[in-house]
Image: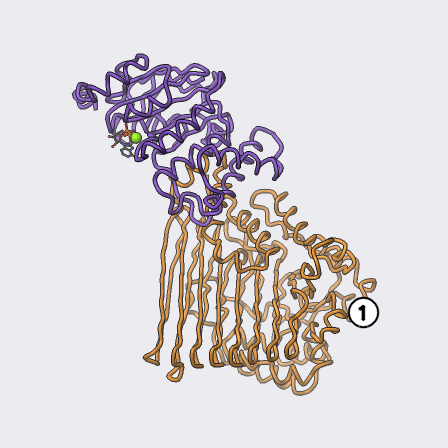
Chain colours: A purple, B orange
Amino acid sequence: MLEVKNLNVAIGERQILNDLSLSVAPGEIAAIMGPNGSGKSTLAYVIAGKQEYEVLSGEVLLNGENVLELSPDERAAKGLFLAFQYPVEIPGVATMTFLKTALNAQRKQRGEEELTIPEFMKRVKKAGEMLDIKPDMLKRALNVGFSGGEKKRMDIMQMALLEPSFAILDETDSGLDIDAVRIVAQGVNALRSPGRGFLIITHYPRLLDHIVPDTVHVMAGGRIVRSGGKELADELEKTGYREYAGESEELV
Amino acid sequence: MAAVQETIERVKALDVSEYKYGFFTDIEADKAPKGLNEKIVRFISAKKNEPEWLTGWRLEAYRRWVTMREPNWARVSYPPIDYQELYYYSAPKTALGPKSLDEVDPELLKTYEKLGIPLNEQAILAGVEGAGSDGRIAVDAVFDSVSVFTTFKAELAKAGVIFCPISEAVQTHPELVRKYLGSVVPPTDNFFATLNSAVFTDGSFVYVPPGVRCPMELSTYFRINERNTGQFERTLIIADKGAYVSYLEGCTAPRRDENQLHAAVVELIALDDAEIKYSTVQNWYPGDSEGKGGVFNFVTKRGDCRGANSKISWTQVETGSAITWKYPSCILRGDNSRGEFYSIAISNGYQQVDSGTKMIHLGKNTTSRVISKGIAAGNSQNTYRGQISSHRKATGARNFTNCDSLLIGNDCGAHTVPYIESRNPSTQFEHEATTSKISEDQLFYCMQRGLSAEEATALIVNGFVRDVLQQLPMEFAVEAQKLIAVSLEGSVG
Ligand SMILES: Nc1ncnc2c1ncn2[C@@H]1O[C@H](COP(=O)(O)OP(=O)(O)O)[C@@H](O)[C@H]1O
Ligand SMILES: [Mg+2]
């Protein structure tokens, strides 16, 4: 489970998250929606441990443990996963090599044995099929020359493979056509389990027709301004973010 | 490859920032008196029982050398070298002329075992079950100034391949040595090559007869052991018409506070339709984290595509040495001949690398390809220096150069110095160069997936050098990959 308590975050001189609190129970799917620039990605990055953000105060607890002092890889080994809004290209590194390196690095940190090659291949095959990723793609350099949709599916495939206890998806649906959204949603739904929490960041309510959230939070100006159930997303579909725009400016 | 596997294991087990080959072997040495003069040159020649022509050849080089100056155009700096403070000959006392492995000093065997280089053919064979004969490698082990043992000689001889210490070739195949020695790198070539010509002590000699494809990978393993001893090895490889040979050299030295001088010369000759592939994994002691000690690697390597349709390919993985000054080059003399240079040069700490190549197009329709990947970390400086030229008669000459630099951190430097010179209007030379930094976004992405900062850096760097790694013989590519990770330790985080 994830608990964010009174988090204040700045980048340079500028404060981006303002006393933000949020809690996602085990097994829960929480959605965060909000206008561009409201700080959604910043929240995701800070939880995952990206360096350039300065945490002024507050706590981030993953399964009860404060992770703010941990490096990103330590957090990953503790079961935290972030699907990036813009997945990064790694030239020259075959996707398959990357998957294996990541999986074994996490296992090593947790004191587990490396996976045998057949076992690894079995898992890759399963995750690849679920996300419609062809074996050919796994031979190519990670994300290099992948379409926007392929990059997003590849990130979700990694999530399926790494089996995190808590996953954050940052606008995974942006730039996807409806079929791709459905594939990604299937991937997420297949991983839904009583022990696993999700934080789904999205700009568009339509994703939430495919991944039905337990809770919906609206973020504006670096804080949560409203919380509710799935109906809140439906409401936003009609009204848009206009009513929060002022709030956002005022707070920034 | 058992040998390689063993080396990999050792690299894996390595303590951070510990140069793992830094041990010293306590073995009694037969040394020439310190310093350099005609007497020393004669001493070395006499030790090797050389014919008069060779003694004369050395002396001429020596007389020339005293009139020469150290080159100063490279982007490297180091305190003056006192050439009279060095020893020019050092041989393990027990090493002279062992005929079988039983006669080799056990201390030496232990040294090579520790380095992951097995000299025992039986052990090698046992280690490559199922690998097929292609998995085998013949090794010439050079310890300070002399070759201590060469494996698989008998089997190579069956194919007509001569693979032996050059000092032995002088005795057994004087006509070949006399014909080719200095024919690619003349004794007057440059300060360090001239010095080498005067005092070279040992190195490997390879001759592959017409039409023969050398049945196994050949390799030389160089080891500097003695203090204040220069290493001046000389390698001569001849691929006769239609022959093929792939050769690999590896190098290490103990860690010492003083700098060690290594000034080698390598000459390759490819006759009509012949091909030579020369790979180097250079891991001399780079000095400590403050820049103290380390090997000065001042090396002249040149290949002559003397025959039509011949091909010479250099691949180098340079991770060691305090200073690297080396430009493996190709003279593309034969029509339709081809030269290749693939390089990965990694510098960390206070290392200085000035390396690159020369492709000299003389014949018609000659082609060359240069792929250089420089990686600078720590406080190091990494320069690519390359010359591509075409002669008036080199109609249809073509070159493609791609030269990429990657910076890790803010205190290092990468530089590219291309010289392009074309005397024939039909020449097509293409040059691409990029410089980039490992991005924070790439590092963060990898770390989010569970890789430590160092694992992430190594992975990204391995991706960066992939085109070149693919040129190495498979077994060594794996080893080189691990070596890259080790060389970059301490460069991030
Ligand atoms: N690295 C950065 N440097 C400067 N400003 C940043 C940086 N990252 C985010 N910001 C700013 O912080 C605010 C929130 O951005 P972000 O978290 O990306 O919002 P969202 O994901 O909700 O669109 C924006 O105004 C953005 O310009
Ligand atoms: Mg965003």
The reply to whether residue B59 is visible in this rendering is yes
User: Looking at the picture, does residue B166 appear above or below residue A210?
Assistant: below
Instruction: Between residue A23 and residue B484, name the one nearer to us.
Output: A23
Residue located 47% across and 24% down the image: A191
Task: Measuring from the top left, give residue B278's x and y in whole percent.
Answer: 57, 67
Instruction: Between residue B243 and residue B303, name the one nearer to us.
Output: B243
- The quarter of the rendering in which ligand 2 is drawn is top left
Residue located 46% across and 24% down the image: A190
What amino acid does circle 1 point to?
Lys
Q: Chain of mark 1?
A: B
Instruction: Between residue A237 and residue A81, name the one nearer to us.
Output: A237
The quarter of the picture where residue B26 lies is: bottom right
> Which residue reaches farthest front?
A179
- Reading the image, the residue beneath label 1 is B99
The reply to whether residue B265 is visible in this rendering is no
| Image position of B253 (left or right of B93) | left
User: Looking at the picture, does residue B279 appear above or below residue A159?
Assistant: below
Q: Is mark 1 within 8 Å of ligand 1?
A: no
